[in-house]
Image (cartoon, rainbow, N blue to C red):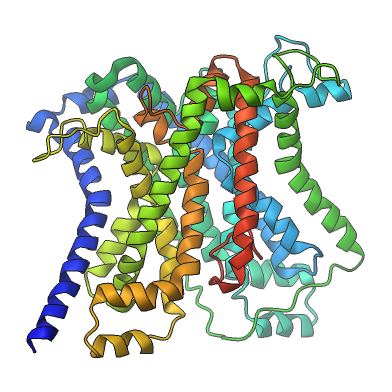
Amino acid sequence: MRFLNTVQGRDAALIVAVTAIVVVLSFAPMLRLVQEVAAPQGVLSTQALRETLGARATWIATWHSLQIGIGGTLLSLVLGITAALLVGITNMRGRNLFVLFYVTPLLIAPQVTALAWLQLFGPSSQFLKVLGLAPPLGSRNPLYSAWGIILLLGVQYGPLVFLIVRAGLRKLPRELVEAALSAGASKWTVLRTIILPLMTPAIIGAAALSFVSCVGNFGIPAFLGIPANYLVLPTLIYQRLSSGGPAVLSNVAVLSVLIGLIAMAGIAAQDYAARRRDFRIVSASQPAAPFSLGRWQFVAEIAAWLLVTAVLFLPLIGLALSAVVPAYGVPLSFSTATLDNFRFVLFEHGGAARAFRNSIFLSLMAALFAVLIAVPFAYLLAWRKRRWTAVLNFAAEMPYALPGVVLAIACLLMFLKPLPLVGFSLYNTLWIILFAYIARFFVLALRPTVAGLHQIDRAMEEAARVAGAGLFYRLRSIIFPLVAPATLAGGVLIFMTAFCELTVSALLWTSGSETLGVVMFSFEQGGDSAFASAMSILAVVMTFMLMLATNLFAGRLPNGVLPWRD
């Protein structure tokens, strides 16, 4: 009995430790943010609220954020739903390859997407010069506008909508569709009256996630909006923090809370819209048989690949061509083509070389820590459910669901002063970025781990528990080997997402802790587009190689863990 009590005590200690880590990663920064808004310096005050909300720039940036949020969401819905319907309910050929390429922009950093499109359409576009269509040097890039930002946000998050709607289409009941077709309904009628209504929850959820992502995006509005003086809330926070430093933290805390409120309003609107009708599907049949496109099959497939060409291949071609010219405005030819830009950013520029090292270190450490914590925490959520586990699940999801700029400001406030007891400060160090990365991307390892545990028989774990094995031993010898493929795939997703991250690191970096995203942004803002393009191409190549490498053990993963697999 004493042995069993000892085992149970160790199990409880491990669960408490993991829970405490998740609470520190999630709730602690957000509570510090709220405290700074309501009571800066520990004293209740409305001065920061009055100053920030009374500024005209705040409401202009808020209106701009709503504009691009709504516009980018609508465009992403059109692109994502169209692609999902084509892949999910038709007999389109080559769907696996299409999904791989169409989802890729979602895994490419937004600032890389922005830079690629700028290099494709700008006056220095090598691609347009080859075609003889380039505008004269010095002319304004047409993407420097609200419409340019909306276009790129739609391209960036169209794959997100695609993934969510495609998952919903997999649950579409075969008998409803076949009954309608047998009754003489046309395929268009079935799509309009059965399929799309049943997909309403998936579409509403996709719209909410897309809106939150658009509102919180920093990379695209920074690359396209700042040159046009079109500021949104994240770029306004960046400018205020860059010029004012810690003295304006209370004011930017108000701005970040404002972004969070807009994001939560979008989620609340999604919840309200979803509850107005009952969309439950009582059937448990196989998915509906694909529609035959008939004589339109070739046309539809050509349209699908034109979409992939427009959103992925052409921008990357423009980016690659810009990376091999020696300077801005120099025409590309066999005599001018050079790899000097790649050599410069890899070996000669101190900040760029340091950024590669920092980004690899931060991404690896964030992925490793998330993988280690995800297994015991997923065990708690999936196999040791209690009333309070729902709160813990919300805590893990919150830093990823809210815009990254909210978490960045919260981390700045939390670590502005030295840590209690140890007297060590994370402020202005690489470690504050690592903390933010772990907090923000932890859920990417948690979700596939929970999905993997739901597919595993608990008999082995329960037998070991009855035999007196402690939780740590069971996790190490039974649970982790069973869910390792799913958890490690989540770690790979974390690495790819964090490798070129900009939204968080743009507000947290300092000299010596530059990341790839920050250096790309600095190169572009300084007019060194060729260097920024070279760094971007290297990042894209690494991302795509990781995607292909992860496919090697895709057969052992739960469905949906790898978003680029059909």
Q: Nearer the viewer, residue 35 or 219?
A: 219
Residue 190 on image: x %, y %:
72, 72
Which residue is outermost to the right? 295
Q: Is residue 180 above or below residue 32?
A: below
Place residue 383 in its image quadrant: bottom left
Place residue 458 in its image quadrant: bottom left
Q: Residue at x 56, y 71 (%)?
A: 559
Place residue 200 in its image quadrant: bottom right
Q: Nearer the viewer, residue 63 or 185?
A: 63
Residue 233 seen from this side: no
Q: Is residue 531 above or below residue 391?
A: above
Residue 309 on image: x %, y %:
77, 44
Q: Residue at x 78, y 23 (%)?
A: 126
Give the total number of marks visible in the rendering.
0
Residue 20 seen from this side: yes
Residue 245 on image: x %, y %:
28, 19
Q: Residue at x 74, y 56 (%)?
A: 98
Indicate the quadrant containing the C terminus: top left, top right, bottom left or bottom right: bottom right
Q: Residue at x 60, y 17 (%)?
A: 528
Indicate the quadrant containing the N terminus: top left, top right, bottom left or bottom right: bottom left
Which residue is outermost to the front? 347
Residue 417 on image: x %, y %:
16, 31
Q: Is residue 82 left or right of residue 556?
A: right
Q: Is residue 274 left or right of residue 252?
A: right
